[in-house]
């Protein structure tokens, strides 16, 4: 880069920066390269999850319907039961889920959920970081969706081999992952700490209260 003297009539000499012609191709290559790297970084960040449908599910009473209960007591709802009279056919509840989540008592909260499809294999930490502050849901949200698909019917929850995951705080207030999978005989429900090294596969459906994922 060269320094060029520029004189304006009636004014002192001003030192201006000028480009050496021989450096122009080099600078252009650098700019294009930097732009490409930034684009690749943006693509990698934005391709983790893909927004899907937005849904609403509420346990509150509607016209002609009975309210289940005001408080949502997890232990009363989440029980292994695959009999024809079960409110939700649940064939398996993981030990971690029972230890960390069955003790919870909640109110329903926000019935509106945004769904996403996981595009790349990712950890729970990476998914939560991208979704942002409103990634959290409640056990009541999970139960409401299960009630709509009590026997494995089609709906917001996937019933193929791909899991459905929710970020829910446990009985101690720690954020963790609740995963729901249809196993044929009934729903299989597990849980794991958010810092667990497990990698969730592409096609996993993620449920969040957030309207848009963090960019």
Image: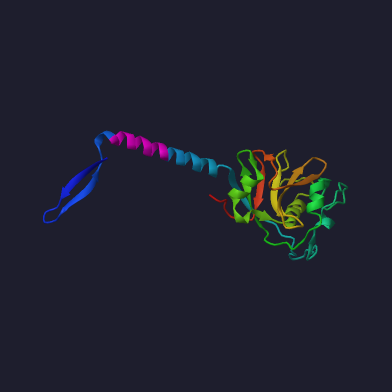
| Residue placed most toward the observer, 112 or 30 | 30
* Residue 162 on image: x %, y %: 70, 40
- Work out whether residue 69 can be spotted: yes
User: Does residue 149 sit above or below 69 in this rendering?
Assistant: above
Q: Residues in magenta? A: 23-34
- Work out whether residue 116 can be spotted: no
Q: Is residue 43 magenta?
A: no
| Residue placed most toward the observer, 185 or 18 | 18
Counting every numbered tag in the picture gives: 0
* Residue 99 on image: x %, y %: 81, 51
* Residue 4 on image: x %, y %: 20, 44
Q: Residue at x 14, y 56 (%)?
A: 11
Q: Residue at x 37, y 37 (%)?
A: 30
Q: Is residue 26 magenta?
A: yes
Q: Quadrant of the rendered structure where residue 139 is?
A: bottom right
Q: Viewed as shown, does residue 71 lie left or right of 110?
A: right
User: Does residue 77 sit above or below 4 in this rendering?
Assistant: below
Q: Main secondary structure of the magenta part?
A: helix
* Residue 186 on image: x %, y %: 81, 44
Visual colour scheme:
rainbow
| Residue placed most toward the observer, 174 or 180 | 174
Q: Residue furthest left?
A: 10
Q: Looking at the figure, which quarter contains the N terminus?
A: top left
Q: Viewed as shown, does residue 94 lie left or right of 57?
A: right
């Amino acid at each position: 880069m060269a320094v060029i003297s520029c004189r304006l009539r009636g004014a002192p000499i001003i030192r201006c920066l000028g480009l050496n012609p021989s450096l122009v191709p080099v600078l252009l290559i650098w700019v294009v390269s930097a732009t490409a790297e930034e684009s690749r970084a943006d693509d990698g960040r934005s391709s983790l999850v893909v927004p899907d449908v937005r849904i609403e599910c509420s346990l509150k009473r509607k016209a002609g319907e009975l309210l289940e209960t005001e408080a949502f007591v997890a232990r009363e709802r989440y029980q292994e039961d695959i009999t024809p009279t079960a409110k939700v056919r649940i064939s398996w509840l993981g030990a971690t889920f029972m230890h960390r989540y069955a003790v919870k008592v909640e109110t329903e909260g926000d019935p509106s959920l945004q769904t996403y499809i996981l595009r790349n294999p990712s950890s729970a930490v990476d998914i939560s970081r991208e979704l942002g502050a409103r990634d959290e849901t409640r056990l009541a949200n999970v139960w409401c969706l299960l009630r709509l698909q009590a026997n494995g019917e089609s709906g917001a929850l996937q019933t193929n081999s791909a899991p459905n995951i929710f970020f829910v705080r446990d009985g101690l207030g720690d954020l963790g992952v609740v995963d729901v999978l249809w196993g044929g005989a009934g729903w299989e429900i597990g849980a794991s700490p958010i810092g667990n090294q497990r990698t969730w596969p592409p096609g996993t459906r993620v449920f969040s209260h957030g309207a848009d994922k963090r960019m």
